[in-house]
Image (spheres, grey):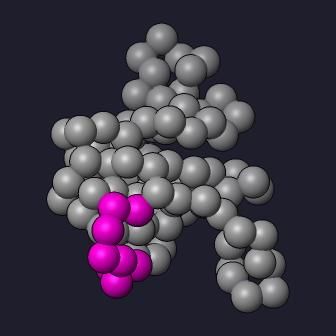
Amino acid sequence: MAWNQHLLSSGSLDKTIVNSDVRQKEAAVSTIKLHRKEVCGLKWHPGGNYLASGGNDNMLHIWDAQKIDQQSPTPLFTFDQHTAAVKVSFLLCEARAPF
């Protein structure tokens, strides 16, 4: 799970990420299905503009917060060279990364 103000993002064994607005009765804002195995890590960038998701499929995806509520969102970046499950964290490298 990862919080971004009123948005709670959760990943699960069924390979999905569910983004929920906890202020709404029907909380689910979007569901992302891209990982091929269970989601084992989620982290919002401190600025709240990007969500990183890691999975047991050895994939790392970076999502744009402005686009995750689309019907079929696509990640801004995908990193697929890991050789093991990906847990995520953001480094504050402003000079090197656009996020």
Residue 41: x %, y % from top left: 45, 50
Q: Which image quarter: residue 26?
A: top left
Q: Nearer the viewer, residue 19 or 54?
A: 54
Q: Position of residue 59 (x, y in %)?
A: 33, 69
Q: Position of residue 69 (x, y in %)?
A: 44, 47
Residue at coordinates 71% horizontally, 34% vertically from top-left? 5
- Establish if 90 lies above or below 17: below
Pinpoint residue 43: horizontal percent, then vertical percent: 57, 51
Q: Is residue 55 visible?
A: yes
Taking the image as shown, residue 10 lies to the left or right of residue 57, namely right
Above or below, 26 against 81 in this view is above
Q: Quadrant of the C terminus?
A: bottom right
For the stretch drawn in magenta, the main secondary structure is: loop
Q: Is residue 62 above or below residue 98?
A: above
Q: Residue at x 25, y 48 (%)?
A: 38
Tell me the residue at 56%/21% (across/down): 22
Q: Residue furthest bottom?
A: 96
Q: Work out whether residue 74 or residue 82 is closer to the camera in this orientation and state it.
A: 82
The question of residue 33 being in magenta is answered with no
Point 81% across, 86% down: residue: 95
* Residue 66 shows up from this direction: no
Residue at the limit of the structure toward the right, as seen here: 95
Nearest the camera: 25 or 7? Answer: 7
In the picture, measured across the screen, residue 36 lies left or right of residue 67, that is left
Does the magenta-highlighted stretch encompass residue 83?
A: yes
Magenta-colored span: 79-86
